[in-house]
Amino acid sequence: MHLYPNSLAALIEALRKLPGIGPKTAQRLAIYLLHAPRGEADALARAITEAREKIFFCSVCGNITDMDPCELCRDERRDRSLLCVVEWPRDIIAFERTGEFPGVYHVLHGVLSPMDGVGPDDLKITELLHRLPKESTSEVILATNPNVEGEATAIYLAQLLKPLVPKVTRIAHGLPVGGDLEFADTATLSRSLLGRQEL
Amino acid sequence: MHLYPNSLAALIEALRKLPGIGPKTAQRLAIYLLHAPRGEADALARAITEAREKIFFCSVCGNITDMDPCELCRDERRDRSLLCVVEWPRDIIAFERTGEFPGVYHVLHGVLSPMDGVGPDDLKITELLHRLPKESTSEVILATNPNVEGEATAIYLAQLLKPLVPKVTRIAHGLPVGGDLEFADTATLSRSLLGRQEL
């Protein structure tokens, strides 16, 4: 006996492919979608198809967008001389939430990771190099993640960019706001000492 | 500035309606679906629509099915005199996984829950009463969950069914297999004593 009707099995299988969704969660979500109001399930199916049809990457900065160039690249109020380099479009969303960055972005779409076979040619580095003279960038902020791959990518980019732009900076490392000294790892603690600032 | 293009915002909104999916997870899943191979996102959208179109509830037992009566109700090898009453279709899947239940099922589609306004008329109890004489049921096993609502529903059904079938039973309570006496709650422990069996 099959545990599920075929079309339910297919739905569970499709949900399981999502990141962080295991077999139990996939089953729960699938059965929820069967019981949910008709409109809700339809809306989800339609939203997936529409997002795939309408969203692409900005030809300038690589952000996700439904118009080219994207809303951020069109915005006249953004300071084009300040360029923040991030790994993924979601990092732009994180910075925009702070409301404190006046410049523009460039999305690498990944980090250098020899273990996963990701080299410089797999990232949007050529596009970055082409932008710099056009936008007369005065500072590039390297905002890759503070982990091994992110650090290595930042160091690689810094060497590449230093001859081309007046200033190349890296986002600060230190204790997270609201964090606790007692629970901070030694690497973070020593970074917070090295990066200390005068009050 | 909008944080997301419209169609991405719509997708995040639709994903957030799923149970256990918060705003962060919804954003992560949505961005994954944008980056995923085209076929994978399409397959998910199609699977949702198809499951909604093809799956309904078996007119006999209330299980989810794509044919009526369902595969379980059609199966000649199942012992029709033994009827297991469960809350939801997923409970059937759980019992079928054990491979040890030879009988048929009846899905209540809920439990009595005065707090949530669920009374006997909201459950598939009328359907259950109609089945019993037709299938010459000799035993009804009440397999609602071992919590307050499940117990109350089992007690209510037992009173209703006792005049109609030779035997009405309740699934056993006790220590879970692989569990630890030290961590068992007192209610479970006292149930495991009350239900002790001779070796």
Image: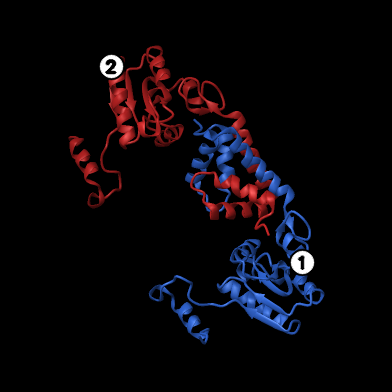
Chain colours: A blue, B red
Residue plotted at (22% across, 40% down) = B192
Residue plotted at (59% across, 54% down) = B27
B104 or A38: nearer the eye? A38
Residue A102: x and y, percent?
68, 71
Distance, label 1 to label 2, CA atoms, is: 81 Å
Residue at the outermost top position = B133
Residue at the outermost right position = A134
Query: Of the residues shown, which amino acid type is indicated by label 1?
Result: Glu
Residue B55: x and y, percent?
57, 29
Residue B54: x and y, percent?
60, 29
**Residue denoted by label 1:** A76
Q: Mark 1 lies on which chain?
A: A
Query: Of the residues shown, which amino acid type is indicated by label 2?
Result: Pro
Residue plotted at (56% across, 35% down) = A8
Which quadrant of the view contains residue B5?
A: bottom right
Q: Which chain carries label 2?
A: B
B84 or A137: nearer the eye? A137
**Tags 1 and 2 on a common chain:** no
B102 or B140: nearer the eye? B140
**Residue denoted by label 2:** B166
For mark 1, does the 10 Å Cα neighbourhood hold few (<14), some (14 to 19), or many (20 or more) residues? few
- Image position of B76 with respect to A166: above or below: above
1 vs 2, front mark = 1
- Image position of B194 with respect to A149: above or below: above
Residue at the outermost bottom position = A198
Residue plotted at (59% across, 37% down) = A41
Mark 2 lies on a secondary structure that is: loop
Residue B125 visible in the shown view: yes
Residue B196: x and y, percent?
19, 37
For mark 2, does the 10 Å Cα neighbourhood hold few (<14), some (14 to 19), or many (20 or more) residues? few
